[in-house]
Image (cartoon, helix red, strand yellow):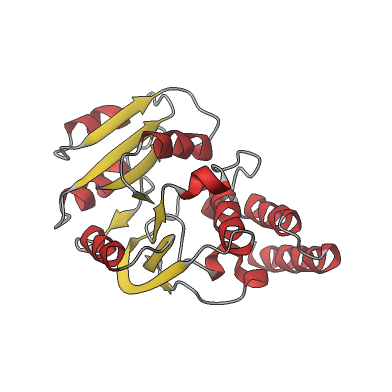
Amino acid sequence: MLSIITATFNCQNDIKILINSLEGSRDSDFEWIVVDGASTDSTLSIVEKSTIKNKKIISEPDFGIYDALNKGVKMATGDYYIVLGADDIISRCAIGDFKSAINKSNADFYSARVKFGSCLLMPGSGSYWKRGGNAYVSSHAVGTCIKKSLHNEIGFYKNSYPNCADMYFICKAVISFNKKIESLDFVAGIFGDKGLSSVNKMGSILDAYKISIDLGGNYFLCTAILFYRLFLLGLCI
């Protein structure tokens, strides 16, 4: 069994896209865990009406997306899980392709390619100082299948990184625990552009800086990279 975890909050205008892609999956043997932050719109009713048979839904106030994901991980019964945002799309063959990779090996992470706008995000590309966790995986959501038991050893997503707790978890797993990531050559789906890390670019840059320091990076080098990223962000505004 593979678990799909989605954190939602007032996303009635986006969630149908994700549901359509899950309902269209060629492999329907998965569980969908929806952790809702007490939505006041029709998000929950849309989820409940979906034809996905094996779904679990909870709705209660939370402390942000990573608090919600931690709840979802604890609810998951699969040995591996994939995070999908409400505005993400998973390809028809992705679940089956991830399962095939898992059956052939026992990696800690599996990361496939992901479409993001006009770009194709690739796993295992670039350097850590430049791309952070995306130097190891294409993207946390959509493109990466994670062994659930890693959280027993490494810990859960930290709310102290409100924009990039996933980056901290992945980088800590690789840098501090020497966990292995297997790169896969299929396209897992489309990463939406409405998530917190995409919208709050300043917050993501500051989180990435703190993560680099916390994982033992050189203070002066990390600070120089911080100012470089802030400079580039200023050019884009």
Identify whether 120 is placed above or below 174: below
Camera-nearest residue between 235 and 82: 82
Please, which residue is most extreme toward the right here?
A: 220
On the image, the x and y values in percent for residue 206 come to 71, 53
Camera-nearest residue between 29 and 193: 29
Q: Left of 1 or right of it: where is 9?
A: right
Q: Residue at x 21, y 30 (%)?
A: 48
Q: Left of 34 or right of it: where is 157?
A: right
Q: Left of 144 or right of it: where is 64?
A: right
Identify whether 208 is placed above or below 117: above
Image quadrant containing the C terminus? bottom right
Camera-nearest residue between 15 and 153: 153
Q: Residue at x 39, y 26 (%)?
A: 39
| Residue 104, picture quadrant | bottom left
Identify whether 202 is placed above or below 78: below
Q: Left of 201 or right of it: where is 100?
A: left
Q: Residue at x 54, y 47 (%)?
A: 153
The answer, for residue 123, to whether it is visible in the render is yes
The answer, for residue 41, to whether it is visible in the render is no
On the image, the x and y values in percent for residue 213 come to 76, 57
On the image, the x and y values in percent for residue 197 come to 55, 52
